[in-house]
Amino acid sequence: MLGISASVEGVGAQPGSTVGFVVAYAVLRLLLVWLFLRARSHTPSELRGFVAWYAAGNALGAVLWLASLLAPAPLLYVLWAVALSVELLAPILAVRTLDEPLVSFHPRHIAERYGLFTIIVLGESVLAVASGTAGTE
């Protein structure tokens, strides 16, 4: 994530400026593939297809991201859109492999996540105001 955030500023500014961003993002996706494949060996047989879809979606997404390095500028962004679509479609297809695709959420966990998100947004807002007014009198 640090590599992605460090390289995002130059994306699209000049030719070749996307290499660091794309490589960092693809490495992150390939790390997820490895983790899903590792988890697959420890899951019950009825859930292995579910985990395999996640791994395949992330692997195909990473390949498309890396292939975008060979594409010219207009096609580059099309490949990014396709890669993101594949990554977003994989969980939907993974859920379809389950016999009973019921997902339960713990209500306190969701409330905690929204609370943490609110704290982060407020903190970022305070930081933005402080940064914006730092050079003024």
Image: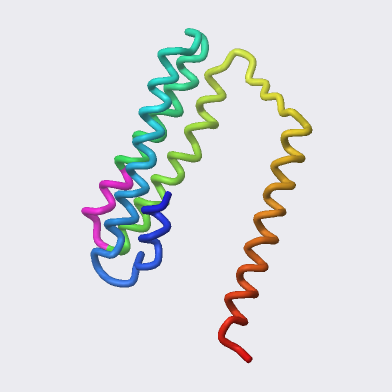
| Quarter of the view holding residue 130 | bottom right
Residue 14 image offset from top left, x and y in percent: 28, 71
In the image, residue 110 sits, relative to residue 48, either above or below, namely below
Residue 83 image offset from top left, x and y in percent: 39, 45
Residue 121 image offset from top left, x and y in percent: 67, 58
| Quarter of the view holding residue 102 | top right
Image quadrant in which the C terminus is located: bottom right
Who's the residue at 43% across and 39% down the image?
A: 86
In the image, residue 125 sits, relative to residue 57, either above or below, namely below
Q: Is residue 108 magenta?
A: no
Q: Magenta residues, as a range?
A: 64-72
What is the total number of numbered labels drawn onto the structure image? 0
Q: Name the residue at the bottom extreme.
A: 137
- Determine whether, in the image, residue 68 is placed left or right of residue 101: left
Q: Nearer the viewer, residue 44 or 73?
A: 44
In the image, residue 79 sits, relative to residue 103, either above or below, namely below
Q: Is residue 66 magenta?
A: yes
- Determine whether, in the image, residue 103 is placed left or right of residue 43: right
Residue 101 image offset from top left, x and y in percent: 63, 20
Who's the residue at 68% across and 50% down the image?
A: 117
- Determine whether, in the image, residue 42 is placed left or right of residue 99: left
Q: Name the residue at the left extreme.
A: 70
Who's the residue at 41% across and 52% down the image?
A: 2
| Quarter of the view holding residue 96 | top right
> What secondary structure is the magenta-colored segment mainly?
helix
